Image (tube, rainbow, N blue to C red):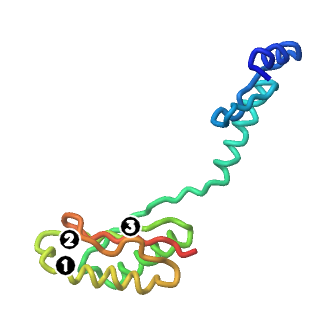
Amino acid sequence: MSSAEGLKAARQADLDLVEVAPNSSPPVCRIMDYAKYKYDQAKKLKEAKKKQKVIHVKEIKFHPHISEHDYGVKRQHVEQFIKRGDKVKATMVYRGRELRHKDTGHKVLQRLAQELVALAAIEKPPAAEGRSLVMVLTPKG
């Protein structure tokens, strides 16, 4: 029916003429209560947001000459973040002349990746960014 006929029918029923599918040919319209339609759309959007999982990126900073105990504590924190479903950005920070020994930092990050191979996958392998090395780990599955 034409749009004029649709508007006339909607007014007689004391309702609104609502365009449901504007991209189709011809556009699809429905006679309904517009306020109720908007409410239902907002409700659906709210439900979709509830079901959506937010992924946070947590950052843990390491130094090339880290002690064994400090490394263990930081590895446990990375493990907790991965189990919770967050991504982890492991950053190797170099200070002063430590930048000459980048291989030491690579070894620490590779060790971390090897110890967490059952829980995490490497999204971004260790790469230099200024005075630091950055590696990103994501939860498996």
Q: Earlier in the sequence, mark 2 or mark 1?
A: 2
Measured as percent of width and height from the top left, residue 107 is found at 28, 85
Residue assigned mark 1: 102
Residue assigned mark 2: 94
For badge 2, the amino acid type reads Tyr
Looking at the image, is mark 2 or mark 1 nearer the viewer? 1
Q: What residue lies at 26% left-to-right and 74% top-to-bottom?
A: 63
Q: Are marks 1 and 3 in contact (CB under 8 Å)?
A: no
Q: What residue lies at 64% left-to-right and 48% top-to-bottom?
A: 49
Q: Is residue 99 left or right of residue 26?
A: left
> Dot 2 surroundings within 10 Å: few (below 14), some, or many (20 or more)?
many
Location of the N terminus by quadrant is top right
Q: Earlier in the sequence, mark 1 or mark 3?
A: 3
108 w.r.t. 15: above or below:
below
> Dot 1 surroundings within 10 Å: few (below 14), some, or many (20 or more)?
some
Question: Given the current orientation, which residue lies at the most extreme right position?
Answer: 13
**SS label for mark 3:** strand
Q: What residue lies at 69% left-to-right and 31% top-to-bottom?
A: 27
Q: Is residue 1 left or right of residue 107?
A: right
For badge 1, the amino acid type reads Lys
> Dot 3 surroundings within 10 Å: few (below 14), some, or many (20 or more)?
some
Looking at the image, is mark 3 or mark 2 nearer the viewer? 3
Q: Quadrant of residue 110?
A: bottom left
Question: Foreground: 5 or 109?
Answer: 5
Location of the C terminus by quadrant is bottom right
Q: Earlier in the sequence, mark 3 or mark 2?
A: 3
Q: Are marks 2 and 1 in contact (CB under 8 Å)?
A: yes
Measured as percent of width and height from the top left, residue 30 is found at 79, 28
Q: Quadrant of residue 75?
A: bottom left
Residue assigned mark 3: 89
